[in-house]
Amino acid sequence: MTKAAAAAMGSIRHPNLWPPFTQMASAANSQRVVSGEGALLIREQGEPLIDAISSWWVTLHGHAHPVLAKAIADQAARLEQVIFADFTHEPAEQLAVRLSGLCGLQRLFFSDNGSTAVEVALKIACQWWANRGQPRYQIVAFDGAYHGDTFGAMAVGERNLFSAPFEDKLFPVARVPWPTTWWDDDAVEAKESAALEVLERVLETPTAAVILEPLLQGAGGMAMVRPEFLRQVETRTRQAGALLIADEVLTGFGRCGDWFASRRAGIRPDLMALSKGLTGGCLPMGVTMASEAVFEAFVGDDPCLTLWHGHSFTANPLGCAAANASLDLLERNPAAFQQFEQRHRPHLERLARHRKVQHPRLTGTVAGFDLVVEGSSGYLNPAGPKLKRLAMENGVFLRPLGQVVYLLPPLCISDAQLERCYSVLEKALDQL
Ligand SMILES: Cc1ncc(COP(=O)(O)O)c(C=O)c1O
């Protein structure tokens, strides 16, 4: 495409920007977004787009939400930042009390994003054993997991194209199959038993922690498991004396139909990583929640017991203010996430009958399926980008993970907008 033609379509290739997860030799140009409005992204050129994936799963209440904007602006006018090692502030304290109450874990440690929230959880888990004079080294994680792009988070994630250049720098992790399931899956119990057998075997080695994404592996392909399986994992983890880390970076804050996926699944982790929807998706912030029993092992006269970890922007007041305002919105209308599954269901049931659709699945606000594709399935399957382009031409922004297509819209999406997402998807499937 010529520069002039690209400019005419409102798309650009900026000479100074390096976008994430993007191969510049083949990527389409980026489109400039000038504003957001609820579920819509307003581009410089072209029709508004329905943001059907909440801008990488973060936007919880919709774009440019007036309540969040006001909370941030008010806070910015009062106190924008302060070193958190020596000071505290009201928005951070309020957030800690509220999140403790909601997730049942008493201590909150701040960081900057989902990856760092996971890093902190891993560091706490390892040091917890060291502090108690019984070091344990093994970490157990699940096949297909994605926990972020920093080194520790990469180490516990599935080793793939993304992590390959760093393989020699990543610590070893024991792996257990993830018994992904979908509607009318006859094999689910067999898959779960096989996974539990592997888990039992790896837990024979003293284990510091088991880390998982409760109910839903996001980047691993919107891969859902049954609550029953997670409860079995928890039981075996407890029997082995290991800590349980729930990575709820994606699944927290109503995404899976309850405040937290752990809560919906009926499990009680020792550590929980949160980010994305934490601030309503407005500002980058991560937190790691820890039980009091975990925290206590870090308290004592010996400086070695200290968690020597921190970030410049720890507990940034703007992020805390946004998070508190986001919790206000969720508390005011929990039906928005509790009843989302019912909004998806009839649409997904219809779509599931399409000949190009297999393995339909649904939890809370997240609906997904696999495309029936030729060639190898996986992140690089070309069907995904093609479907993305077709949907975009019809006003819906999707970002399939290879052959996995999903909708993960903001809670504010209207019935008409949701209906539009599904009808555009159906049309695009016909055209594939
Ligand atoms: C489950 C999970 N954990 C961790 C992360 C990493 O979060 P971030 O991209 O904010 O570093 C992600 C991001 O998608 C995620 O889905």
Image (cartoon, rainbow, N blue to C red):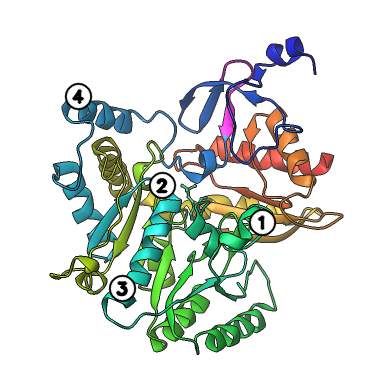
Numbered label attached to residue 77: 4
Disc 3 residue type (three-letter): Trp
Of the image marks 2 and 1, the number of the one nearer the N terminus: 2
Q: Which residue is mark 3?
A: 128
Q: Amino acid at mark 1?
A: Ala
Using the numbered discs, state the Cα–Cα distance from disc 2 to disc 1 in whole angstroms.
Answer: 23 Å
* Closer mark to the observer between disc 4 and disc 3: 3
Mark 3 or mark 4, which is nearer the start of the sequence?
4
Question: How far from the left and from the top, in percent, is residue 27?
Answer: 72, 32
Mark 2–mark 3 contact, CB under 8 Å?
Answer: no
Tell me, yes or no, whether the two marked residues, 2 and 1, touch with CB atoms within 8 Å. no
Say above or below: 163 vs 124: above
Left/right of residue 304 with respect to residue 383 in the rendered view: left
The answer to whether residue 135 is above or below residue 405 is below
Disc 2 under 8 Å from ligand 1? The reply is yes
Q: What amino acid is at disc 2?
A: Asn
Disc 1/disc 4 C-alpha distance (Å): 45 Å
Element class at badge 2? loop
The alpha-carbon separation of the residues under discs 4 and 2 comes to 24 Å
Q: CA distance from mark 4 to mark 3?
A: 39 Å
Which dot, 2 or 1, sits closer to the camera? Answer: 1
